[in-house]
Amino acid sequence: MGKKSKRYRAALEKQPSKALPLGEAVEVLKKYDSTKFDQTVEVHMRLGVDPNQADQIIRGSLVLPNGIGKTQRVVVFAKGDAAKVAEEAGADEVGQEDLAKKIKDGWTDFDVCIAAPDMMGLVGPLGRVLGPRGLMPSPRAGTVTPDVGKVVGEYKAGKVEFRNDKGGNVHAMVGKMSFDSTKLTENISAFLEFVNGMKPQSVKGTYVKGVAICATMSPSVRIAF
């Protein structure tokens, strides 16, 4: 690990040694020394799931109450009326073969990829490009849908996707440091409750083993959950 900056070391001195209630944890996070840019706030959950078991994969999406403080770039694979609806909903780019070729050639300058079901024959081969970047449309994530307009609107409003990693951890963006404490707390609480409600029946023992929040360039704060 590289040498920590003076600013970061100073922030570490303010890091609580124990887990705090959510509201207090957010207040501590916001008191860390600021940077010259608006840091992204993230939540990280350590779950007691076995990522190798298909029925214990924690994956989904939700619209946070106060958005994420970022305008997401959305591309859509659709044709006909669905394409028109996607454009009206604010999609940054809508296409078919032309869009597929552009992505196949390496273009991935977007945050979300949505596809109408009748487009998956075209989108499927793009898995090699989109999959490693977490951009592949999926029915489970809600990004393969006949209602492309609705989903485009949700992502533009602040919808986040998540999926557990190989260690059983879930990570998500939940706002910006410029958000007031109430908005951040509401967003984080909504995310935690949503994931907590997804506990697989096959999981035995403790489901949520640990929760922490942090910003782009700040130490973490553990949450009592």
Image: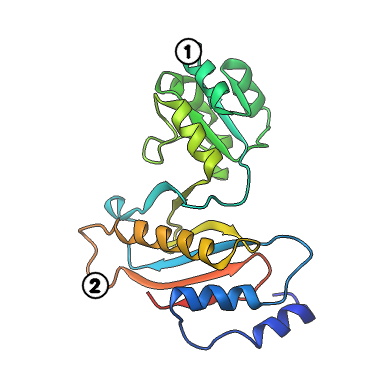
Residue 19: x percent and y percent? 45, 82
Q: Counting other residues with Cα less than 10 Å from the Cα at mark 1, is it few (<14), some (14-19), or many (20 or more)?
A: few
Q: SS class of the residue under badge 1? A: helix
Q: SS class of the residue under badge 2? A: loop
Residue 4, by quadrant, is bottom right
In the picture, measured across the screen, residue 76 lies left or right of residue 107, that is left
Residue 124 can be seen in this image:
no
Residue 94 can be seen in this image:
yes
Q: Nearer the viewer, mark 1 or mark 2?
A: 1
Q: Nearer the viewer, residue 21 or 213?
A: 21
Circle 2 residue: 205
Q: Residue at x 55, y 86 (%)?
A: 16
Dot label at residue 81: 1
Dot label at residue 55: none
Residue 105, by quadrant, is top right
Q: Quadrant of the C terminus?
A: bottom left
In the picture, measured across the screen, residue 83 lies left or right of residue 53, that is right
Q: Nearer the viewer, residue 109 or 86?
A: 86
- Identify the amino acid type marked 1: Asp
Q: In the image, is residue 99 above or below residue 200? A: above
In the picture, measured across the screen, residue 145 lies left or right of residue 80, that is left
- Identify the amino acid type marked 2: Gly
Q: Quadrant of the N terminus?
A: bottom right
Residue 107, by quadrant, is top right
